[in-house]
Amino acid sequence: MPGNRILDLDDIGNIFFHDGYNLAREYLADGLSKDRLTMLMTAAYEAIDGLIISFRNRCLREGLHIDCAQGCSWCCHQAVLVSTQEVLLISRYLSREMAEEQQQVVCRNAREKEAVTGDMSVREFLQYLHPCPFLLDHSCLIYPVRPMACRCYLSSDVDSCLAQYNQSGNRQIMASLYDFPLRAGRLINEGIRAVLMQNRVITSEWLLEVLISKTMAHPGIFDEWLSGEDPFTIRALSADENEYLREYRHRQESFNDGD
């Protein structure tokens, strides 16, 4: 299969970390608040969306395919790891843009999925397939505030996505993803996380359904979080789990480098 690497990411990767870091420094210069964090994450998403538009245009010019399209939801059944600050944005969107009845539905969906994945090992939940709590009729209910991981997931071959869906336990079969957006989004998030940690705010990254369930069960959880507490505490990962997660991300980002 032809490689899909366009840029030498080893040379430019730090740029995206500093983009996220500088963006966070700018928006949080006057202190931490839910409003400022919401504006920060909105700006970060706008930045990555603009980058992806440019990336799509370059792919088009170079005759490279991006098979992602509205109504395709093969990727919407796998594990999504999301940061605390991203969950804040989602939580605000739910309360302000979604009808109460629909909120109850997605809350129930999240709890039901968490009941299964909450005690899974990293290896188990990365192989487990179940619809995202926000998936309805092959469409995302929170598309404007969807997590960074979802925004940056661009496939060059929908058949590879279907193959991964059908054989999720086979580590030799992975979706043919473009590595550039994946790394860019991850590093922007890491830059933001670095600034939050400097401000003594503990930011977790964990399963979407777990953090959403915590948020919906505790209305004041973000106030506690910004006060320096850690209400989003996740279980400690074993050394093997951390290594498996690092290896999985590396394989995901380099599976079709063409190297």
Image (tube, helix red, strand yellow):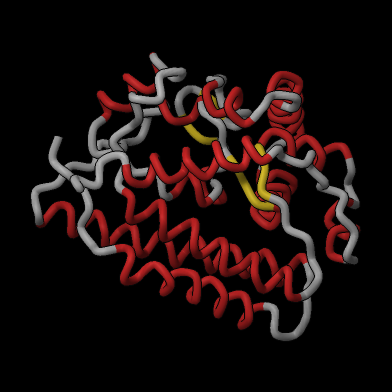
* Residue at 44% from the left image edge and 19% from the top image edge: 168
Q: Nearer the viewer, residue 93 or 18?
A: 18
102 up-or-down from 46: above or below: above
202 up-or-down from 133: above or below: below
Q: The N terminus lies in which quarter of the figure?
A: top left
- Within the image, what quadrant is residue 240 found in? top right
Q: Nearer the viewer, residue 159 or 5?
A: 5
* Residue at 25% from the left image edge and 24% from the top image edge: 159
Q: Can you give x and y, in whole percent of width and height, for residue 157 in the image?
A: 23, 32
Q: Is residue 105 visible?
A: no
- Within the image, what quadrant is residue 42 found in? bottom right
Extreme front residue here? Answer: 239
Q: Is residue 61 left or right of residue 247?
A: left
* Residue at 18% from the left image edge and 59% from the top image edge: 58
77 up-or-down from 35: above or below: above
Total numbered labels: 0
Q: Can you give x and y, in whole percent of width and height, for residue 167 in the image?
A: 39, 15
Q: Can you give x and y, in whole percent of width and height, for residue 178 in the image?
A: 30, 47
Q: Nearer the viewer, residue 27 or 173?
A: 173
Q: Is residue 21 left or right of residue 228?
A: left
Q: Is residue 197 left or right of residue 12?
A: right
Q: Can you give x and y, in whole percent of width and height, for residue 47 in the image?
A: 44, 67
34 up-or-down from 93: above or below: below
Q: Is residue 158 left or right of residue 206?
A: left
Extreme top residue here? Answer: 166
Q: Is residue 26 visible?
A: yes
* Residue at 25% from the left image edge and 41% from the top image edge: 256
Q: Nearer the viewer, residue 203 or 251?
A: 251
